[in-house]
Image: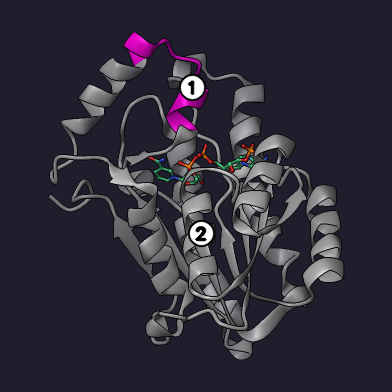
Amino acid sequence: MNRFEGKTAVITGGNSGIGLATAIRLKKEGARVVIVGRDPKTLAAEASAHGFVAIQADVGKVADIERMYAEIAAKVGRIDVLFANAGVYRSAPLADTTEEFFDDIVDINLKGLYFTVQKALPHLNDGGAIVLNSSTVNTKGWPGIGIYSATKAAVRSLARTFAAELLPRKIRVNAVSPGATFTPIFGRLGLSEAELNATAEALLKTVPIGRFATADDIAAGVAYLASDDAAYVLGAELTIDGGIGQI
Ligand code: NAP
């Protein structure tokens, strides 16, 4: 398939996990791909391994997002596909949550995603596609991840509003909601190997299909939503979670 021939795709968080798998998939299908992230080492490594354009930016800072789009415009021109994927996962129960912890997650997962889309508008071609990365936990009440889940519920909601507002420009907006996906996100929690294994074991019991998703399981859904195969899909959520949210 060459669904993205002649198209330019921008993927925030394209230097790791789900974003990287999506970048590789879109590139294989013909897209010119720009990856955005904070870590200069992984950005440079993945750009050189796969032929991406890499831009360093912290999406938690609006000034960085503005600079990022100025650099994208100068390097590759206009954008056809945006995957607003950058995000962080951290847990703390209500009683222990600090203002700093709250702001950190909300700044990246919600404010960052919101302005990633807003500041893209002058650079996006009409008829383009935007995919927002939510999570299957946007409908769950799992203890300890209240702020994370709330940001992801907000992202799911924004897919509806953005879809309506961008309808006149024929830019389709949809959300993807992954379940437990095997990516570096869990290694960033600061847990020991034993704690990580215990968490993975407990998490796996919640997955009806009996395995974690691969990043490519999710990338396949993102590519579908971003492509003309999904020409009639608007403001929707594609849940790819091995049944967590359904069974
Ligand atoms: P990951 O491997 O940790 O990737 C996260 C990516 O986001 C990295 O490329 C990271 O770049 C980037 N990022 C984080 N904060 C950023 C910031 N302030 N500015 C720019 N880039 C930033 O995790 P992943 O599992 O692929 O997660 C990707 C998305 O999927 C997230 O939104 C996550 O919430 C969502 N998701 C994941 C799962 C799962 O089970 N893995 C399930 C549901 C939803 P740097 O490394 O350069 O910081």
Residue 19 seen in render: yes
Position above or below: 225 against 151: below
Q: Quadrant of ligand 1?
A: top right
Answer with left or right where residue 246 lies relative to residue 52. left
Q: Amino acid at mark 1?
A: Leu
Answer with left or right where residue 62 lies relative to residue 165. right
Residue 154 seen in render: no
CB under 8 Å between discs 2 and 1: no
Answer with the quarter of the image where residue 27 lies: bottom right
Please provide percent x and percent y for residue 172. 52, 79
Q: Amino acid at mark 2?
A: Ile
Please provide percent x and percent y for residue 206. 18, 35
Ligand 1 within 8 angstroms of badge 1 C-beta: no
Q: Which mark is residue 199?
A: none
Does residue 41 show up magenta in the picture? no
Q: Which residue position is annotated with label 2?
A: 24
Position above or below: 185 against 228: above
Q: Which residues are magenta?
A: 185-195
Q: Secondary structure at mark 2?
A: helix
Q: Which residue position is annotated with label 1?
A: 189
Identify which residue, 68 or 32, lies in the foreground.
32
Q: Secondary structure at mark 1?
A: helix
Per the picture, the main secondary structure of the magenta-coloured stretch is helix
Please provide percent x and percent y for residue 223. 44, 69
The residue drawn where x is 33% and y is 46% is 214
The residue drawn where x is 41% and y is 30% is 145
In which quadrant will I find the N terminus?
bottom left
Answer with left or right where residue 133 lies relative to residue 57. left
Number of dots carrying numbers: 2
Identify which residue, 177 or 29, lies in the foreground.
29
Q: Nearer the viewer, mark 2 or mark 1?
A: 2
